Amino acid sequence: MRSIRFRCPRCAVPLTPRLRALELAEALCLQADQTWLLPAGWFVRRDDPMLAGSYMAEVLPDYPWLLAPLPSRWVKLHPDPARTVGCCGLNWRPDGPNLVCRCGHEIGFGQCDCIGPHWYSLHASAVREESVNDQPQPDYAGRLARARELLAAPITSPPHDPGRCHAMADDLPSWERATHLAELELACGGGVDDPALVIASPQLPADARLVVRIPWCQLVRQLVLAEKPWAENELPLAWKSPREDAPQVEVSRHRRRVLMTVWGPGRSEWAVTMSLSTWADAWARLRGADGESDALDDADEPCP
């Protein structure tokens, strides 16, 4: 398979880990109020037919490389707050890049709204370092068919509320207030139009299940592309189902621990934690043998 790493045109420091070109349209999310535009580990060009008709295909033509938001060890926010401060997060104007390389070179744009970051975009001058390995292309069609089969199951468990808990990704002491799941099993159901994760654990009351609504594109990313089911706590993986009554969800990692926070609508607000391996293994079992992930491999870090 072919992958690309982008480097700064001024200092040649890596701006991204190795990324692959996204070809699976069902893994895209054009709605900024639901989740990231595309999964981590992948990129898409603005002129890709999958983006035809969206505003992302029309703006910033000199910044053609669209990718998932990146933590600050890769790219940083512009030091001028006038370039970054917006009412709902990272703001952008066509005449002022808001992302810089660690050397300070202006390299791209990022866009956020109230759900969190939606996309990052790199300038055409970013150096592309291509590589090819002998790893065969996964059977994405087979995995997609299996994901649809998994979702065909009805959700019969009423959603359990583990109790109001105010925990935040960037407030590590608050993680201690969340319910800790030492063991868990994942299932999904509800159909493609209204999918949900169902979480079972011995640490919950007998027969209780956590039911978490999730966009179809997020399940495609996890079940088909086998992406990491978390993001760094400085930039959590956030999503919201298209359902009006669905809560907002964030999944963040700090070292070997994962926090899931769920809040709204109404006064619903709860959080659970689990070890990184517990969360990763649960997703691997849900995917099945063909969908195993290297989600614990963090070796692809920026060079010093």
Image (cartoon, rainbow, N blue to C red):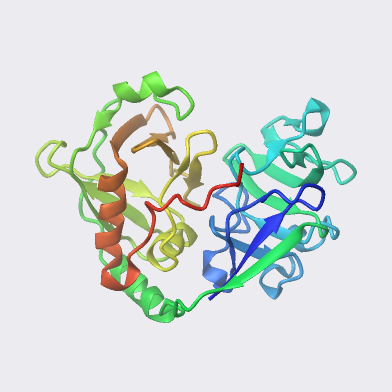
How far across and down, in percent of the image, does residue 148 sit?
36, 72
Q: Is residue 166 visible?
A: no
The residue positioned 43% from the left and 77% from the top of the image is 140
Q: Is residue 168 above or below residue 62?
A: above
Q: Is residue 166 left or right of residue 122?
A: left
Q: Is residue 41 visible?
A: yes
How far across and down, in percent of the image, does residue 275 sit?
28, 39
Residue positioned most to the left: 206
How far across and down, in percent of the image, does residue 284 sit?
29, 60
How far across and down, in percent of the image, does residue 248 sit?
46, 40
Q: Is residue 82 left or right of residue 176?
A: right
Q: Quadrant of residue 168?
A: top left
The residue positioned 58% from the left and 60% from the top of the image is 18
User: Is the C terminus in the top left, top right, bottom left or bottom right quadrant?
Assistant: top right
Residue positioned most to the top: 173
Residue positioned most to the right: 95
Closest to the observer, 302 or 108 = 302
The residue positioned 74% from the left and 31% from the top of the image is 86
Q: Is residue 263 left or right of residue 80?
A: left
Closest to the observer, 295 or 214 = 295
Closest to the observer, 271 or 96 = 96
